[in-house]
Image: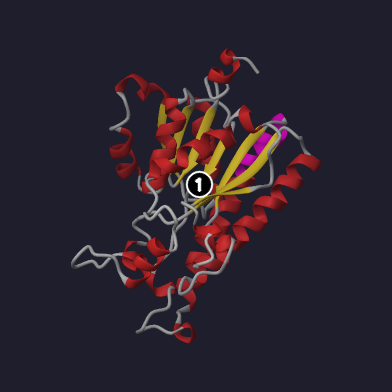
Amino acid sequence: MNLEELTTIYDLSGHTALVTGGSGVLGREMAGALLGCNANVAVLARDTKKAQEIVSHFPKSEKGRVLVVEGDVLKPESLERALATVQAKLGDVDILVNGAGGNRPDATTSVDLSFFDLPADALRQVGDLNLLGTIFPCQVFGREMAKRGAGVILNISSMNTYRPLTRTVGYAAAKAAVTNFTQWLAVHMAQNYSPHIRVNALAPGFFLTEQNRFLLTDPNTGELTARGQAIITHTPQGRFGNPEDLLGTLLWLVSPASVFVTGIVVPVDGGFTAFGGV
């Protein structure tokens, strides 16, 4: 591969990417990176006002290639409407990034809430958001990829893929299922539709987001909780991830640079999974 090919392999001109959860801390960075590589970008969000505010900070010269579209990852009918809107305004979706997900305090054990008392509705909501909120977009947007015989799907997994983490019961189980689903869908798409449809996942290490801030920092002082400090101690690079730390791996997995890569989960974790604690 010559220098010119190396410098153009990440050019996504003419491609349309859709990012679910694009108004979240990590999702908006990923949407911005895809836009910066010349893709058209649709940001799917339930709260379109919040998403529009985020999009307003993208460079003005690129605004014509950005679309905020309303949709709920747990409601396939709303995803079908979003698909029609994106196709009409930006074209077919070539890249799907499943960034929607998260946790909630009442699906997490604590001193005041034991495993045995976790409410069923909280566990169900976290499980549905992370697993079905990944599967449903793959059905709606993946169906179009299957018709065309090409496309890239990138799911968001978790450190729970490699080892169960304490306290985060529903989230851990759901993200482990996302990893299994990623591998299953990669094989299913390649064998039944086209080897040019690739499915992979990112497994972010510990990044401060609105979903985990309550676990990692004290809301009154902003200092690390005991759990937050334990994470830093067990991360060889000694810090939480910054959202931009995900972008190199994101762009590799959605670009032709990884054309022979499907069915894998890539940790971006500062060495967390490699460290045994001693």
Q: Quadrant of residue 209?
A: bottom left
Of the pair 70 and 30, the residue shown nearer to us: 30
Q: Is residue 67 visible?
A: yes
Q: Secondary structure at mark 1?
A: helix
Image: 106 above or below 115: above
* Tally of marks: 1
Residue at image coords 57%, 15%:
3
Please tell me whether residue 155 is drawn above or below residue 68 in the rendered image. below
- Residue at image mark 1: 78
Q: Check the image and tell me how it is coloured.
A: secondary structure
- Residue 99 image point, x, y percent: 48, 47
From which residue to which does the magenta span run? 140-148
Q: From what the image shows, is residue 96 above or below residue 102?
A: above
Residue 253: x %, y % from top left: 59, 37
Q: Quadrant of the N terminus?
A: top right
Residue 147 magenta-highlighted: yes
**Residue 256 location (% of width, % of height):** 63, 27
- Using the rendered image of the protein, determine whether residue 24 is visible from the camera's viewpoint: no
Considering the whole magenta stretch, tell me its main secondary structure: helix
Residue sitting at x 30%, y 22%? 60
To which quarter of the image does residue 28 belong? top left
Q: Which residue is drawn at the image coordinates 52% and 61% (left, top)?
A: 275
Residue 178 vs residue 44, the one in the foreground: 178
Q: Is residue 236 above or below residue 5?
A: below
Residue sitting at the far right: 191
Kind of residue at disc 1: Ser
Measuring from the top left, give residue 104's x and y in whole percent. 40, 67
- In magenta segment, residue 154: no
Front residue of 250 and 139: 250
Which class describes the residues within 10 Å of circle 1: few (<14), some (14-19), or many (20+)?
some
